[in-house]
Image: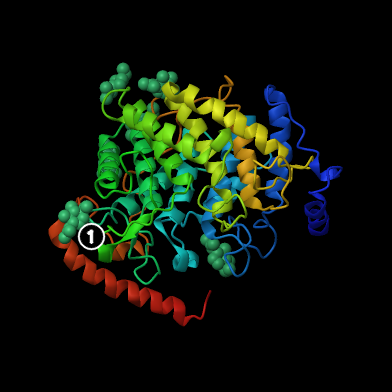
Amino acid sequence: MAMWRSVCALLALSIASPCQAALEVDLQSPASIRAAAKVVAKNLMSYYHGDEPGMTPGILPGPPPGGPYYWWEGGALWGTMIDYWHYTDDKTYNDKTTHAVLHQANAPANNFMHSNWTISLGNDDQGFWGMSVMLAAETIYPDPPADRPQWLMLAQGVFNTQAHRWDDQHCGGGLRWQIPFANTGYNYKNSIANAILFNMAARLARYTGNDTYADIAEKVWDWMEGVGYIDKDYNIYDGGHVEANCTDIDKAQFSYTPAIFIQGLGFMHNYTNGTGPWDARLTALTKRTLEWFFPDGIAVEMACELDTHVQCTTDMLSFKGYVARFLAQTVQVAPNVHDLIMPVLRSSAAAMVQSCNPDGTCGFRWNKGQYDGLTGAGQQMNALGTLMALLVDEPKVIPPVTNSTGGTSLGDPAAGGDSSVERYFKPITTADRAGAGILTALGIIGITGTLALMSTRFGEGGA
Ligand SMILES: *[C@@H]1O[C@H](CO)[C@@H](O)[C@H](O)[C@H]1NC(C)=O
Ligand SMILES: *[C@@H]1O[C@H](CO)[C@@H](O)[C@H](O)[C@H]1NC(C)=O
Ligand SMILES: *[C@@H]1O[C@H](CO)[C@@H](O)[C@H](O)[C@H]1NC(C)=O
Ligand SMILES: *[C@@H]1O[C@H](CO)[C@@H](O)[C@H](O)[C@H]1NC(C)=O
Ligand SMILES: *[C@@H]1O[C@H](CO)[C@@H](O)[C@H](O)[C@H]1NC(C)=O
Ligand SMILES: *[C@@H]1O[C@H](CO)[C@@H](O)[C@H](O)[C@H]1NC(C)=O
């Protein structure tokens, strides 16, 4: 396989290369799209070995240096596979998916914060698992057995632990990137972490009808604008450091961040029946994102996919797929942006198909008209996400449900509060809505507690 791929990469310049035959699909035909998605999904799942003897369920090979993929990308994979089931009705991977997600859920805390992953545990990493279980609830993906945690309660577990980490002491609010104090990046407040909190808050508000979530979504959005991470032209920048009160803004822009905000805005639009400030924000951010990340109507990861060369990390190689999936779900809850989004997803898909081989191995660059030899699980998720998105108008692909429109997943508004890392960060009682006065004292407990935890972890000589 590896050998064949590199031969293809060499041949890619030659006009007669067999590798230039694209993935066979008629993008006007839902049946053809489903058939092509099946081929791409199979190729994607060939990267997953977590269900083999001695392997850890839920994760892709890694984390580095053990393999290229960090823990969060497993969470992203299962969200992709839940969507795959939802869009195509192909149940082939459901058992693997359910087993994988429940293994990583960290029951009984139900917060996706297992101590195996502490040294790379960012709010965004945890949050990707959270968005995937939220999707399971919204699509009525088959519920786990009654004695296991349920999708909605897992989503609430992620949300609650994150909401309790909201930090008013620096930068006027916001979530930090990393969760444990000792991790590099704990002093960085970034847009992606806050994007996911916003997204989960908006979706939980709509699913449960509980306004508390919507209030938090509003708080996150206002903070993002206030601190200048979202500018007046709807660019969304990467983040800043607490030492600089978040004014040292790193202006890199990554496509998944606005996509996660757009999806959340779509849910806020829907939750408020199109009233309030959400519509204007949704339209403006959608337009800007399509303009910046889809030059000539083709997805490009602008910060690292340069005209001359690709300098994307493994993480970044997977962002295009989330963009397509999240924009497609937005269309379902916010029909007012349907005609902005769908033509671009279609033109991007048409280009993407040219980057794939007939066996469903897809490259990364979609604006070169051929396979580029740059393969991986992220690229497969990109291709699959983009293909599936074109099925969103099919009547069988139901819009995300709510608790009162067919949702079956059981929730627990207090989920997640009980994890070993979290207890050092969260206010004394769950009901305590983060009185700023006690945060300083808690900060001190937090530092001591986390250092104790971290020294245990490193003392084991692990990782
Ligand atoms: C944690 O790591 C151990 C040892 O590799 C493994 O057996 C277990 O399944 C892992 N648990 C999770 C949640 O990843
Ligand atoms: C820090 O930033 C926040 C948010 O932008 C602002 O409200 C606050 O006044 C700033 N604090 C200082 C000391 O500059
Ligand atoms: C609404 O959500 C908040 C935040 O999680 C929770 O504390 C509260 O109990 C919920 N209310 C109801 C009625 O479920
Ligand atoms: C949206 O409409 C629904 C159904 O008509 C109604 O129950 C709900 O209160 C409305 N919400 C807002 C924020 O207007
Ligand atoms: C909310 O979403 C539903 C689909 O669940 C859709 O039919 C409805 O038009 C949306 N409401 C608004 C205000 O866009
Ligand atoms: C969700 O719906 C079920 C059944 O329709 C109902 O028993 C339950 O109280 C609802 N939960 C919330 C949070 O509204």
Tell me which residue sits at (40%, 69%) in the image. 184
Tell me which residue sits at (44%, 49%) in the image. 253
**Can you give x and y, in whole percent of width and height, for residue 146 in the image?**
49, 43
Quarter of the image where ligand 2 sits? bottom left
Residue 353 in sight: yes
Query: Does 154 sit above or below residue 212?
Result: below
Query: Does 421 sit above or below residue 200?
Result: below
Query: Along the horizontal axis of the image, is 53 left or right of 402?
Result: right
Residue designated by label 1: 170
Residue 137 in sight: no
Query: Along the horizontal axis of the image, is 361 left or right of 452?
Result: right
Query: Along the horizontal axis of the image, is 346 left or right of 438?
Result: right
Q: Quadrant of the N terminus?
A: bottom right
> Type of residue at label 1?
His
**Can you give x and y, in whole percent of width and height, for residue 217 in the image?**
30, 40
| Viewer-side residue, 455 vs 171 | 171
Tell me which residue sits at (50%, 66%) in the image. 116
